[in-house]
Image (tube, coloured by chain):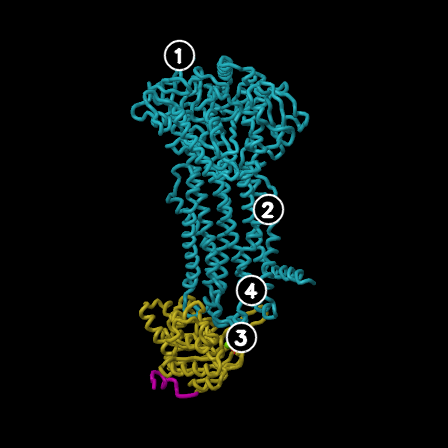
Amino acid sequence: MSDQALVRLEKVSKVFETELVQTYALSEVDLAIYKGEFVSIAGPSGCGKTTLLSILGLLDSPSSGRYLLEGNSVHEFGSTARARLRRSTIGFIFQSFNLIGELSVSENVELPLTYQGMGASERKKRVGAALERVGMSHRASHRPSQLSGGQQQRVAVARAVVGDPALLLADEPTGNLDSENGAQVMELLGELHQSGATLCMVTHDPRYARLAQRSVDLLDGQLASSAEVAAVPSAASGAAP
Amino acid sequence: MSPFVLSIRWALRSWTRAPFLAATAILTLALGVGVSTAVYSVVSGALLNVVPWSDPDRLVVLEARRLEESTQGQGAAPGMFLDWREQARAFEGLAALQYWRFNLTDGDDGGVAVEGRLVSADSFDLFEIKPAMGRGLVPADGEPGAPRVAVLSHGLWRRRYGEDSSVVGRQIQIDGEPTTIVGILGEEQFFLAPPDQLVMPLRIDPAAASRTDRSLFVMGLLRTGATLDQAQRDMELVIERLATEYPASDAGWSVRVRWLSDVFAGGDRATASMLLLLAAVIFVLLIVCANVANLLLARSAARIKEMATRAAVGGSRGQLARQLLLENALLALLAFPLALLVARGVRDFFLTQVPPYMGWMAMVMRFDLPVIGFAIVATLATVLLVGVVPAWQASRVDLQSALKEGGGRGASAGRPWVRQLLAVAQLGLAISLLSTSLLMVESMRRVQTRDPGFDVERVLVTEVQLPKARYPSEEHWREFERRAIAELSRVQGADAVASVDFPPYGFPGPLAAFEIEGEVTLPDKSAPSALVHTVSTQYLDALGLDLRRGRGIADSDEGSSVPIAIVNRTLAERYFGQEGSLGRRIRVAGSWREIVGVVEDYPNRSLRDPIEPLLLIPFSQRPHPSLGFVLRTSRDPLALASGVRAAMRQLDPQLPTLDVFEMEQRMENQLWGPRLVQSVMWILSQVALLLAAMGVYAVISYGTSQRAQEFAIRAALGAEPGQVALLVLRQAALLSAFGVLVALGLSIALSPLLARMLYAGTGWSVLQFGGIAAVLAFVALVAAGEPAWRAMRSDPMGALRAE
Ligand SMILES: Nc1ncnc2c1ncn2[C@@H]1O[C@H](COP(=O)(O)OP(=O)(O)OP(=O)(O)O)[C@@H](O)[C@H]1O
Ligand SMILES: [Mg+2]
């Protein structure tokens, strides 16, 4: 079973060296995420959630330990290979949306596909579908600055899922949203999970954490507990309702 | 503390917070304004200062031109001048000037040769020239038989007489005749051009005035209110009348009336050069404007928050804009003294390019009030011009969005297209300057690789003007010439010696009309014309010229034998074509001559000028008191110089000190002007390129830093480093491409000016295109390289931890 894990971290540590102090953002974290799982990560501010997620998302690399993604030791990969993996395998949803102001909504969503080198007509189709899915088709040609926060985050979700990534990562996706918009975005993520996506999400909000099958608590860079919230992961894989 | 003082303190402090930016802006301003000011002092010197009279808007020049050939304008013959003056209606008056080399003797030494002008005696009145001491010329001085008088330049008065004011009224010998000094010009006053040292009245005898010797430079003062066009039409009527009255000499010629200021600095070509330099100066200043504007825009974009806060606490738009303008004025104040230093340095460099005999250029390339005024205006205009836009922008900041943008996503980078536009304009201006300057280099290269016609490195030249008093008749001239050639031939190392009235690579004398036997000149066609040079038997030998056909001048060609002429190839081909010229007869200066030889072409005036038709006539058949001597040697010609001087002293110890030149030096001297223009242009284009590269760098670098967040997002989404860098490089490439388009447009606009001053046939070559493309690629790469490198290293983590 362990061989089927989509993500496997083995003794992953992350040390930030600043002038005088060394900060252990993560120490010897072991974590496995299975295909189709929905894992939520919680913990106090500064405990290393964002650090963990950025390592999972290949935005950053561990100081020590191994990271296996779909069985590949990606901690050994160079920057180009990591970039390639980022655009093909991972979808990232940021707390602060991070849409590019100069590009329109549809161009923003199209970006990962462009980097994958996909043909224009295929891209168009996929972008349309992704925007449809998050309910933003009617705003396709708008600029991000013309959207509300919740709408921007929905576009960001569309951008994260457009390439059909194996792993969807979200760092406090509702952190900058009011509760109503937050709920809408969470509903969207729930739907994505229902349709088979593997999700790993950082959130402070216990209501949303409950949506996940499994909740992981981080404390001072160490995994504190791993509570099964719902059914076993293997049962969920491939079994969409 | 008053609000104004407070504003100044704010301004000072705001610059100390951005020291790098302030220093860049100040240096850019100093460099641009400094170089421009130096060039302006050259241009104003050449274009403005040399026209010394009070009313330059009414001063014109009347140039004779042959109808069907677009050669340079010619002077007028004395007979024509008298008729023009009598018949033309559009002018307050006309004045004729003739270049003259005077022999000035006033003591026991040999005296000096002095350049100057014979001018119509009423021209001091006409142009309202009042000498600093004594009087100017008056009409009575021009009457036949009136006592001889002269006006000295300040420089001659200082050098020769140590500023002794008792000189006024003193009698000296000029050209061997007693002449009274009646006036001294002021220190920065000159009659027509600074090299003129001496002015004497021109006397024309109406009964014997020539109509073919076109040696007079005719100027006019337009009647108040008369336009150039009216004057032109008026002169055309006069010319028409004279052409029917004197078909032999006047038919086929026209007159063009031009502003003196257009003509002055040496004709069309020099004016074109000066205008081109002026355009280049404006280009450089525009580039400076664009650069500083870019810096200020970048700064004001970064200060939107500050401005919004100032406004939020009650600053009015006007107050904010004033604050920014004050900050810019402070920049100008700091840049100005530096600009003056740069200007002085560059101007001093230009002066080192001027040959010693043109030393008076220092006098016209002044560093005076107008030039300093130019620097002030250029600095202030630049700073205020570029300051207005950011000030205006900042003063109408949308408070709500500016303060809210602190939240900070999708922060738009202000108006990036304004900056991009400025960068494109800069590149365009710089490239067009570079291409112009390359064309000038190429033109000069062509000129210098042109065949000088003979072995200039082995020839020495000296000139002498025989004073009429001691050499009154043809017999004296013949005698002197014979003795001089004999004496010079004895100089050690002289292989061949000859005389010529107008030695090559100097003033070639006027074009004279001639008549071909058996051919009738139709009234509407211009008479054939040629330079006529009087030379001794050994002339072809002494220069080493090739005879193409027939024979040279022989000892047997005496005053009493059949008059002959030798023509150059251009004359033979232009007027005789296939039929051949040998044996044909032409009438020039009143006598029929048989053409006995055709000599190979050689440049007459300078390597830059086209070769004119030329007639060589034996000295023995038309003696002349203006004598030049050419010596050929197989040694270093200057080694013979002292021998030549000694020989001339031996001949006549009272003859003025003679200048001895190498022919090669004379040839080079003719090119100093274009060379100066070329090096000025080169400096300007290099400064322009440097500034434009800085500008492009600033724009791309700033844009890249503005887009850091975007690049991080792209990297987080899986863009490879190369793909991000490509975004930056693509921007640089786009800027360059548009820059080339702008440059193309500018070059097309400048090409008529350029065509007038380039040596015939100079045009674009593949090599130059390649060169410019390479330079451009280099500039873009340098400018975009560092930002692209930065972009390439965009950390995807930046997307997570923004702001
Ligand atoms: N680039 C860095 N340099 C130095 N220390 C860092 C860096 N990034 C994070 N840290 C430190 O690592 C620790 C974990 O940071 P991290 O951002 O992962 O926390 P977090 O759990 O996401 O907090 P929050 O809930 O506030 O977002 C913190 O102590 C933080 O100060
Ligand atoms: Mg965090």
Question: Are marks 2 and 3 in one subunit?
Answer: no
Tell me which segment is drawn in magenta: A229-241
The tag earlier along the polypeptide, 2 or 4, is 2
| Residue for badge 2 | B373
Chain letter for the cyan part:
B
Q: Which chain carries label 3?
A: A
- In the depicted structure, whether residue B682 falls above or below residue B600: below
Question: Are marks 1 and 4 in one subunit?
Answer: yes
- The amino acid on which the numbered mark 2 sits, given as a three-letter code, is Gly
Q: For this rendering, which residue is in front, B769 or B137?
A: B137
Q: Quadrant of residue B349?
A: top right
Q: Residues within 10 Å of mark 2 (few under 14, many from 20)?
A: few
Q: Does the magenta stretch include residue A240?
A: yes
What is the CA distance from the residue labelled 2 to the residue labelled 3?
Answer: 66 Å
- In the depicted structure, whether residue B463 falls above or below residue B679: above
Q: Position of residue B148 (x, y in %)?
A: 59, 21
Foreground: disc 3 or disc 4: 4
Q: For this rendering, which residue is in front, A215 or A178?
A: A178
Q: Position of residue B114 (x, y in %)?
A: 57, 25
| Residue for badge 3 | A24
- Name the element at disc 3: strand
Q: Position of residue B99 (x, y in %)?
A: 52, 27
Residue at the outermost top position: B560
Left or right of residue B497: residue B520: left
- The amino acid on which the numbered mark 1 sits, given as a three-letter code, is Ser
Question: Are marks 1 and 3 in one subunit?
Answer: no
- The amino acid on which the numbered mark 3 sits, given as a three-letter code, is Tyr
| Residue for badge 4 | B395
